[in-house]
Image: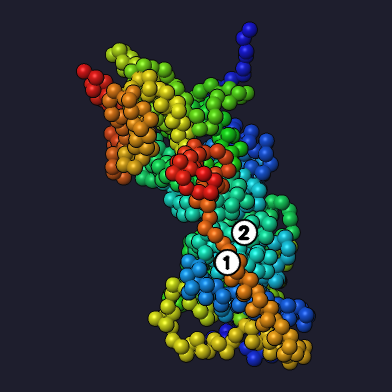
Amino acid sequence: MTMTTSTTTMTMAKALNEGLRRAMEHNPKVLLMGEDIGKLGGVFRITDGLQKDFGQDRVIDTPLAESAIVGTAVGLAIRGYRTVCEMQFDGFVFPAFDQIVSQLAKLRKRSDGAYTMGIVIRLPFQGGIGAIEHHSESPEAYFAHTAGLRVVSCSTPNDAYWMIQQAIEHDDPIIFCEPKSRYWEKGEVNLEVPPHGLFDAVVRREGSDVTVVGYGSSVRTMLRAAEAAATEGTSLEVIDLCGIAPIDFDTLAASLNKTGRLVVVQEAPRTASVSSEIVAELTERCFYALRAPGLRVTGYHVPYPPARIEEDYRPTVDRILDAVDRVMGFES
Amino acid sequence: MIDEELVQLLTPEGERVTHPDYTSTLSGEQILSMYRDMVIVRRLCNESTSLQRQGQLALWAPIQGQEGAQIGAGRALAPMDFTFPTYREHGIAWCRGVPPEAVLRLFRAVSNGGWDPQKHRHHMPTIVLGNQVLNAVGYAMGVQRDGAEEAVLTFFGDGASSQGDVLESFVWASSFNAPVVFFCQNNQFGISTPSSTQSKVPLFRRAHGFGFPGVRVDGNDLLACYEVTKAALETARAGGGPTLIEAYTYRMGAHTTSDDPTRYRVDAEVEVWKLRDPIERVKALLVREYQIKPSVFDDVDVEAEAFALKLRDDVLAMGRPDPLSMFDNVYAEPHPLIDEGRRDMIELGVGARS
């Protein structure tokens, strides 16, 4: 007996759009707020057509003030609404940082549970689109560090479609990181069955020699590295983190206990980052299984560079393979 | 200080004056009841200052001199309205039915909140200046979407009027015609910084630039604060959009119990404002116009003393929170780091639940 499920091919941008549409149909309390998200459909067109179908009261074109987008979403949450805030670009989230850290993250605690801060902050993040400054940043660690918040990232259209809906249904505030360089890649979307829980790490490719962990735009780079490594006889297990805070360490540890070698990939600079946290925690959990120290392949400790040289900043297949060689080299 | 645009219905001497736009609608009974509120809130404030001096509170933010503004505004609210305070709105909390000892939980450092904000329709005290003003506008946008005839009243001071969040709030409230009233208590100081450093124009005039009305009211005039706030709330509920009220007042005490105002202001100024006391002028009115007898005021004082004694007992009875409670309500849904922290603390043998 075979189960048939309907799948549709679409881009990540379209999948997010469809996910938002489904969440809005499902719950009349779901609102969208952001700059240019109405008639224009957002600068990346993620909200294309939604204002036309749901009206200006639910898809709200806002004045240009990010602190106010989050600050008013907090007030709307107190009133029982669930707002999905669009930050136009990663580098523009910082005016909202105060509201996110001082109010959004803390109000459930401060109200002894009287408030539910069911707010999603959509953040097109990471680089790779040849943009000018402030349009290619990876600020996820700031938010992962803050108690009260959760952080996730999608890497495929199917995950994007389901994770945005799961995030909207979730009762905690979620920073939803979208790898903008992957918006226009197509993939199969299963419209009936969610692939996994919102914070579950997913093994994208099974392997036996090295566990390679990353998220967002890094996942495709890791998969390419795994193909290249396979031709040289090295088997990489590629894990898409999905949940950046909290991290699904059980899935990561199960893989590392099998391979004994760890490489973590991210675009953000290394110091005090998500990759640092993963290496530290897995070293503690899997100490006796480790055959080499965990390595990090990351952006450099510089402001995100001009786009003409961004590919020398972002983790590449070659840099991942160098790290793979190093962890493999500890064996001999 | 008297600005020709200042709305005043009761002079510092307790004499009624007329204003073209506002008329006092309060009965003698209501005024006496609000007099009682002001006396009790001032007593709360004095007792809290003593408790801080005796090491029983970590900090206290006094409101002496601002009782008229707060009781006037607070009593103008309808039950379903929602309020968004700073950390100094003790008079508003009183009007919203928040238990007085709950207000002191923050200052005794046993809680970062203190009361159920949904039950009392009074948001948590907000310490980061101006944050709550945006939250209030958002709440008002929700009221608007619900089609409810409710208004939102939010508070800030002359200091916070320089914060981006407050100015962004003005933009949003105006653009979305949100049913919110901005109540700025200009008590002349942000800790030591005079209000003249915050603004070169009277604060209420800022509203005009944002496209909604601004009103300056004598913040030490209970009657005027009540009428101006009531009218603005009614306008908001009826879909007329936001109003900025600048209650022009004076912080008679320190910024907090950690402050020393003698370093930045002169006694002569304080003496001038003593003559404008919000409580004394209402008392004068009650005596002159309603022939309220001294025994009635004595009864209020006796009640306030009993109130203070009970408050003191309630505060002293507040024990140290269970350390494990720090893990409660950080998240609405299960979180592995919360489970881990709680487990570690229990293993250490800390907390009542271990």
Find numbered disc 1 in the image and state the secondary structure of the residue it sits on: helix
Identity of the residue furthest to the left in this view:
A332
Regarding residue B245, the answer to whether it shows in the image is: no
Q: Amino acid at mark 2?
A: Trp
Q: Chain of mark 1?
A: B
Indicate the amino acid at tag 1: Val
- Reading the image, the residue beneath label 1 is B315
Closer to the camera in the image, A74 or B52:
B52
Seen at 40% across and 22% down, the residue is A255
Question: In front of the other: label 1 or label 2?
Answer: 1
Q: Is residue A52 above or below residue B93?
A: above
Q: Give x and y (percent) for residue A137.
A: 39, 42
Residue pictured at 51% horizontal, 79% vertical = B253
Confirm whether circles 1 and 2 share one chain: yes
Q: Residue at x 28, y 29 (%)?
A: A293
Helix or strand or loop: what does disc 2 sit on? loop
**Sequence-wise, which precedes: disc 1 or disc 2?**
2
Question: Is A226 situated above or below A33?
Answer: above
Letter of the chain that mark 2 sits on in the rendering: B
Asked whether B201 or A6 is in front, the reply is A6
The crowding category of the residue bearing disc 1, from other C-alpha atoms within 10 Å (few below 14, some 14 to 19, many at least 20), is: many
In this rendering, the answer to whether A305 lies above or below B6 is: above
Q: Which residue is mark 2?
A: B115
- Neighbours of disc 2 within 10 Å: few (<14), some (14-19), many (20+): many
Considering every residue shown, the one lying at the far top of the view is: A1
Q: How is the image coloured?
A: rainbow
